[in-house]
Image (cartoon, rainbow, N blue to C red):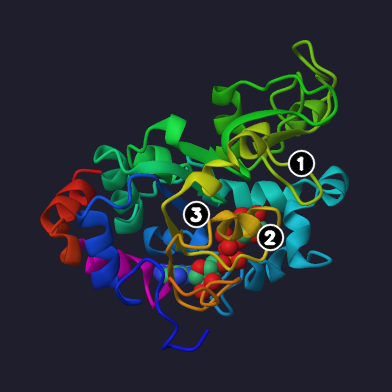
Amino acid sequence: ISDDTPPLTLSERSLAAVADFIKFGKARRIVVMTGAGISTAAGIPDFRSPETGLYANLAALNLPEPEAVFDLSFFRENPRPFYALAGELHPGTARYRPTVSHAFVALLARRRLLHMLFTQNIDCLERAAGIPPDRIVEAHGSFASQRCIDCKRVFADARMRECVARGEVPRCGGDSDHDDDAGHGTSRSGCGGLVKPDIVFFGEALPRAFFEQMDRAREADLILVMGTSLQVHPFAGLPNFAGETVPRVLFNLELVGSLGTRADDVMVLGDCDAGVRKLADELGWRDELEKTWREL
Ligand code: APR
């Protein structure tokens, strides 16, 4: 796309133009797509950033390859690396706070401009930010619930938190494999199978909600993509569901996916919190944004 291509919708490819678009009421169905990049400021590493990403720091767990930590067949063979990681990420044990980027999406929801948030994150910070659950699709599941990978029996949240806090592997019917070792077997009714949080492992199907809500992305009149490498499908295809004349704004350290190939793509390359603060300034929402974030 050469720069002199007449923009179809925005006056120019800038945050000021995006702010005008919103202020003049042309964006009432904003669809937001997020990844781990919006939680790095909360202290949760993303996956693929070279130095700080999770996949660059799992060497201690001597995995065949980093992604194995989220691979179902590897988990069956050796669930310990995942549970070593879960201890840091599980909302029950971890004390992470939503970021300014989460607060911005909560602000959109409060102003009834959020059509849907699709997130790949499993940290539940979107819920913690006060975004209404019916406006959130956790495309890769979350730690909010867990079940046996064999008999699918749901495992109690409280017992899960105990196991994760103790770094133990929970088993169906037992408290953890520690019990089995002690020969108590499955103290309660259960098959003894491994328990796994309802997060989507590689090779697993995405939650039904993702496929049910996918069309929301086609109904969007503005798309915001924040903090994702868009490496993992089918989520990565979502930005392309937007209609040709729908502006798409990328808040990301790097250019990703097909962003930048359409006349009304706006690239805000850099820290996403800084990017949404700039947009809030253009919108005159900056004080409200900071107040929202402070109160989280
Ligand atoms: N501001 C803006 N962008 C950031 C920031 C930040 N503070 N921190 C990181 N990023 C960018 C990185 O440059 C990268 O492009 O966010 C993106 C994070 O990409 P990934 O680490 O690949 O995370 P994500 O896209 O969420 O991964 C998708 O992969 O491992 C699977 O299931 C897992 O949901 C995850 C999926």
Report if the beta carbon of the residue with label 2 is closer than 8 angstroms to ligand 1: yes
- Dot 3 corresponds to which residue? 33
Q: Percent position (x, y) of residue 56?
A: 64, 73
Bounds of the magenta span?
265-280
- Residue 47 seen anywhere in this rendered image of the structure: no
Looking at marks 2 and 1 on the same chain, the residue that comes earlier in the sequence is marked by: 1
- Dot 2 corresponds to which residue? 232
Q: Secondary structure at mark 1?
A: loop
Q: Secondary structure at mark 3?
A: strand
Residue flagged by tag 1: what amino acid is it? Ala
- Dot 1 corresponds to which residue? 205
Separation of residues labelled 2 and 1 (CA atoms): 13 Å
Q: Are marks 3 and 1 in contact (CB under 8 Å)?
A: no
Asked whether 262 or 238 is in front, the reply is 262
In the image, what residue occupies the spot 61% across and 65% down?
230
User: In this image, 233 relative to 220: left or right?
Assistant: right
Q: Would you place residue 4 above or below residue 240 in this image?
A: below
Residue flagged by tag 2: what amino acid is it? Val
Q: Is residue 207 magenta?
A: no
Asked whether 202 or 97 is in front, the reply is 202
| Quarter where residue 149 is shown | top right
